[in-house]
């Protein structure tokens, strides 16, 4: 409980950047989605989705997203931001992605 220490966010960012993927903000997702859409990309795969946070942010920014992970966080008792399928990349079914 209580207020977080003023360094807690900075520490979280350093730790996640060192030991996991760095945090991805709403504005980062919007910029990535805008650039991909400018290049004609409408559908993306997040192959190492974990909790699905990046997939959720990219979908909110307008992309069609499939999230997969060999061990999704939700199957390990963790929180999930987005539906993450327990699939290896080679099991995604790329032929269905052709427009």
Image: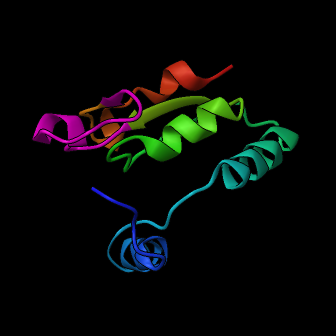
| Quadrant hosting residue 85 | top left
Residue 74 among magenta residues? yes
Residue range (magenta): 68-84
| Quadrant hosting residue 41 | top right
At which x and y percent is residue 63? 67, 31
At which x and y percent is residue 57? 58, 40
Residue in the foreground of this view, choosing between 90 and 86: 86
> Farthest residue in the left direction?
76
Q: Residue 22, relative to residue 38: is it above or below?
A: below
Q: Residue 64, relative to residue 17: is it above or below?
A: above
Residue in the foreground of this view, choosing between 78 and 96: 78
Residue in the foreground of this view, choosing between 65 and 2: 2
Q: Main secondary structure of the magenta part?
A: loop
Residue in the foreground of this view, choosing between 5 and 79: 5
Give left or right: position of 42 versus 49.
Answer: right
Which residue appears at 34% of the width and 43% of the height? 51
Quadrant of the rendering where the N terminus is positioned: bottom left
Q: Residue 59, relative to residue 54: is it above or below?
A: above
Residue 65 among magenta residues? no
Give left or right: position of 42 versus 2.
Answer: right
Q: Give the colouring mode of the picture.
A: rainbow
At which x and y percent is residue 18? 38, 80
Which residue appears at 84% of the width and 44% of the height? 39
Quadrant of the rendering where the C terminus is positioned: top right
Is residue 74 at all visible to an observer of this figure? yes
Which residue appears at 47% of the width and 70% of the height? 9
Is residue 43 at all visible to an observer of this figure? no
At which x and y percent is residue 5? 40, 74
Which residue appears at 40% of the width and 62% of the height? 3
């Amino acid at each position: 409980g209580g207020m977080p220490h003023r360094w807690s966010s900075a520490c979280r960012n350093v730790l996640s950047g060192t030991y996991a993927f760095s945090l991805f903000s709403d504005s980062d997702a919007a910029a990535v989605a805008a650039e991909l859409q400018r290049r004609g990309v409408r559908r993306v795969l997040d192959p190492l989705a974990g909790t699905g946070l990046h997939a959720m942010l990219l979908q909110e920014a307008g992309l069609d997203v499939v999230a997969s992970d060999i061990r999704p966080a939700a199957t390990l008792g963790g929180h999930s931001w987005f539906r993450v399928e327990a699939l290896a990349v080679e099991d995604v079914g790329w032929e269905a992605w052709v427009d």
